[in-house]
Image: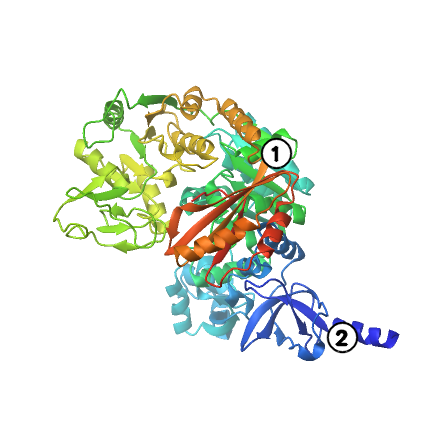
Amino acid sequence: MPERHARSVAAVAMRASVLLPLPLEGAYDYLLPEDPALSPGDFVRVPLGGRTLIGVVWGEGSGAVESGKLKAIVERLPAPPLRAELRRLVDWVAHYTLSPPGAVLRMAMSVPDALLPPRTVTGYALNDHGRAALAAGERSLTPARRRVLEALSDGTPMAAADLARHAACGAGVVRALFDLGLVGHAALAERSQLPEPDWRRPGPTLSSAQEMAAKDLAAVVAKGGFGVTLLDGVTGSGKTEVYFAAIAAALARGRQVLVLLPEIALSSQWLQRFRERFGAPPLEWHSDLGQAARRVTWRAVAEGRARVVVGARSALFLPFADLGLIVVDEEQDASFKQEDGVIYHARDMAVVRASLAQMPIVLVSATPSLETTVNVEHGRYARLHLPARHGAARLPEIRVVDMRQARPERQRFLSPPLVAALAETMAAGEQAMLFLNRRGYAPLTLCRACGHRLECPNCTAWLVEHRFAATLQCHHCGHTEPVPPLCPACGAAASFAACGPGVERLSEEVLARFPAARLAVMASDTLTGPRAIATLMAAVEEHRIDVLVGTQVVAKGHHFPLLTLVGVVDADLGLNGGDLRAAERTFQLLNQVAGRAGRADRPGIVYLQTWMPEHPVMRALLSDDRDRFMAAEAEARKAQGLPPFGRLAALILSAPDDDSAEFAARAFARVAPQMPGVETLGPAPAPLAILRGRHRRRFLVKARRDVNLQAVLRQWLGRVKVASTVRVQVDVDPYSFL
């Protein structure tokens, strides 16, 4: 018996568990290769079925399968291993969100090419002729050519682009030196020289409040260890410069820094400010990056060469070698919630990653989320406060326009007070912003003859007219089609009417009233990537635009000194529907929009067009009483046991036909959780009852804070076996209720 046990232990010791980036329930056992020098976190190539895949060594083998049935690891890849804190984060996120660990790992392995040996590229090296010419000081060498030769004088080959940047010249100078026979080709592993932010550079002059907050943040970073600090400051108070001090402190300690931004649209001016502060840009990480840039960035992060990374929520899963600080800017923004695939909130998971790695994290906002506010009040988070705008700037004056009293003209959407304010602003040589959180020309198109409404064929949603692109679009599944010449229901010609305004229709009205106005529309579908955004931002800053009309992408992070008027065309828009955070989100968004006005020495004014001037959101904005509004929100949620005082999870079922969705929903309803502290609501058709051609049902599980909600959900899911055509999606801490 002891001999048999010894053999089984030896058998287990000769295997390793490997987690694959697939939606599988856990790691698989593999036999160690002939050279068994493997450690947890190593990237390996393994066989699975008829394929060979890349996975990560997750630990020792489980011994659940006999060795004779196992396949062997093919090879270890020459990539930096996945660090323990990131592996723990993968397991934590999988457990919390009820996602397969492999699906979470896939987000950390989003660039498979970066795991392979670096590609070979052609570089340049100084040869004997070039060395002699440099030593002799030949007159034929221009200053630019001399700088190139001097850059190569230590014998290290360099790629053409890196060499040109180092020598401050064009790539043509490098090629000319090759043609002259003064430099030769050399094979290089692809490894771009990265810009190095200089933390020693002096920053701008800070106010006394900024200076105190900056010193406190720098001290937190220098101390190290886990801690969450909320940097809470009004719009225009200079929060970015304050947390730049924390970044400088982390760089001074030789640590890496991650900055999360909710919208790529925020990055243009932010990147410019970072360059001015640190003398070099950070590396970027977002969906608009090309594959080559993603490969270089991922590898540089893993090797510790990328000092600062700014990115969208997916940057949270980058394999940092020595991460020492995380900053989450605009922490309250709903864009940090990932709604597809693995459903998670990047802000919350960033706090988890900081905790697992024992590092500080800074949450930044002018309108903190209720979750963060409650954590501050209970002493779990520290708080630094900036109560006033920087310099001579003052908060704008807020005016509420009661649309019941100041009605626009027929088929117009701007009230007389706002129209007058626009005229005054442009006459004074200043800029205006009109905000309407609705893309396209009109949210609904119907036939005047029969009332038929143009609907998406894949979703229970109206098609939105985009007149600039001459299409109808579904904003949920992406379906597009041209506007039909005849009504598909009654055959009437030229009978379609646009109902309601989008930003395109609003811009049409502005130009009709002010033909000489230089106008631009800023929405996610009118801007194609960071370069287009940067171009538009430059046009506004240089006063080549008088009126900016936009959706929520105009609301946050932008600083335009001449922008003194903000008009919110439909302040009530976000208050509709059953979202438990509707009032909070609307207050936050409108506060951010209002904060674009009067950010320099010229005073700003904000007009809120509303049909509900008595609503608590409008009263709070008018009185500038954020704290009282948030306290009332907290009391209302606490009384109902809603987050952050209770817990919620959504269970969403979808199927290709309605009968299958209903059958699965009834199966889950029969075994729904029945226990103290847990309430199950549903099933009910989702507000978007059909999405991307799939019929949907929703449950909502409401629980007390002390209930292990994940255990309840796992037990429930384990009681029902659904058909292969039915998808079951779990959303812990839902933000969307569609």
Q: Residues within 10 Å of mark 1 (few under 14, many from 20)?
A: some
Residue 119 on image: x %, y %: 50, 71
**Mark positioned earlier in the residue sequence (2 or 1):** 2
Taking 596 as reference, is 263 above or below it? Answer: below
Instruction: Give the number of the disc on residue 375.
Output: 1
Look at the image and tell me whether residue 40 can be seen: yes
Query: In this rendering, which labeled residue sits more in front, label 2 or label 1?
Result: 2
Q: How many marks?
A: 2
Taking 701 as reference, is 287 above or below it? Answer: below
Q: What type is the residue that disc 1 sits on?
A: Asn
Q: Residue at x 14, y 43 (%)?
A: 449
Q: Is residue 391 left or right of residue 463?
A: right
> How many angstroms separate mark 2 from mark 1 (CA)?
49 Å
Observer-nearest of 314 and 719: 719
Q: Residues within 10 Å of mark 2 (few under 14, many from 20)?
A: some
Observer-nearest of 22 and 456: 456
Residue 203 on image: x %, y %: 52, 37
Residue 428 on image: x %, y %: 26, 25
Q: Is residue 26 left or right of residue 114?
A: right
Q: What type is the residue that disc 2 sits on?
A: Ala
Q: Mark 2 highlights which residue?
A: 11
Look at the image and tell me whether residue 147 can be seen: no
Q: Residue furthest right?
A: 2
